[in-house]
Amino acid sequence: MKSLITKIFVVWLLVAVGGMYAQDVHFTQFFNAPMLINPGLTAMHNATSRVAVSYRNQWTTVPVPYTTFAGTIDKKIYPRYKDDHFIGVGARVLYDYAGDAHLSILDINLLGNYAMILNPSNILSIGLGLNLDRRTFRDDELRFPNQWNGDHYNPALSNREPLAGFNFLYLDLGGGINYRFQKSNRTWVNLGGAAHHFIRPKQTFYDNGDNPRLPLRLAATLMGSARLFDAVDMLLNGLWQQQNVYQEKVVSGLLRLYLNRQPGNQMAIDLGAAWRVGDAWAPLFGLHYHNWYAGLSYDVNTSAFKVATGGRGGPEFHMQYYFYRVEPLKEYKKCPVY
């Protein structure tokens, strides 16, 4: 147990080294939205299936706040008479909205994951995600230089922007791999990597010959839980992402305190903090009750942008419900009749 905890802690520290230079669709509690990071984490949990919602409201103190909502569902499918693999299937809907232009993205994602059970403690999974996305914006609250008539702003004047339209659709594809070591329901490790935007879809509202493409996004995660005492677990999580020249690194640590471990009436709380390197830190709180889980955090800016935000990054909330189903026996034999 001490060796396992030491290994988790060392890798967690390695992930923390570096800086963060980008703001994109992201969650501080990335470990509560794993299918956004890696398709190989689809259905990689102890339950049969899971339903989850996530909400983030960022930078409400500045004129261009970001609001993100996501809903996910995933499920394990066990083949009959086989116990050396299972299939994870899932779906995700994500909506992100920002700024005076009402720039938004609606993302519908279908995920599939094949998990090979190497032995009772080791699982290797490979997943794919297919996305259909729609980007939109509005210009009715925007002001353009061409609408200045030399004396005052005139909204009746054309903005003369070579726009092809105010929305476009595109397909996208991503994939990932994950290794899971599981000693028990309370002691486990997920180590994975993923790549997104294989298709590199075109990203422009203009019709001027430009052909900008969405850069490949790489991600690596380490998420683990270790039972320290009968009523205490330690959870450590690390995330690294890179897209073009931009990077994001997030680490978090929590203690899970079990208030009631009676079957059917379990209750526990999570207390800890997360650090987005070079950008923000956030206190974390989680509540488990039976099959329900709720997680809450609040970003506090530490970067130079705190001059505009006053340090108030914004709240984030996650809620999950887990379904557990007892699987039927692999083989049934009736007693012979004499």
Image (cartoon, rainbow, N blue to C red):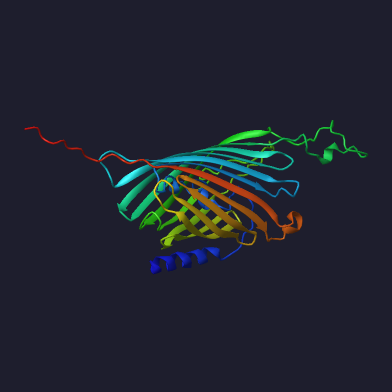
Left or right: residue 313 versus residue 256 is right
Between 19 and 210, the one lying in front of the other is 19
Is 102 placed above or below 10 here? above
Residue lying at the far top of the rendered structure:
156
Is 174 placed above or below 336 here? below
Q: Position of residue 285 (x, y in %)?
A: 56, 54
Left or right: residue 216 versus residue 117 is right
Residue at 61% across, 57% down: 282
**Viewport quadrant of the N terminus:** bottom left
Residue 90, by quadrant, is top left
Q: Position of residue 271 (x, y in %)?
A: 54, 58
Residue at 48% across, 53% down: 268
Residue lying at the far left of the rendered structure:
338
Is 8 placed above or below 121 here? below
Between 228 and 274, the one lying in front of the other is 228
Residue 107 in sight here: yes
- In the rendered picture of this protein, how many numbered marks are placed on residues? 0
Between 95 and 245, the one lying in front of the other is 95
Is 326 placed above or below 305 here? above
**Viewport quadrant of the C terminus:** top left
Q: Position of residue 228 (x, y in %)?
A: 43, 64
Residue lying at the far right of the rendered structure:
151
Residue 2, by quadrant, is bottom left
Between 165 and 272, the one lying in front of the other is 272
Q: Position of residue 286 (x, y in %)?
A: 54, 52
Residue at 72% across, 43% down: 99
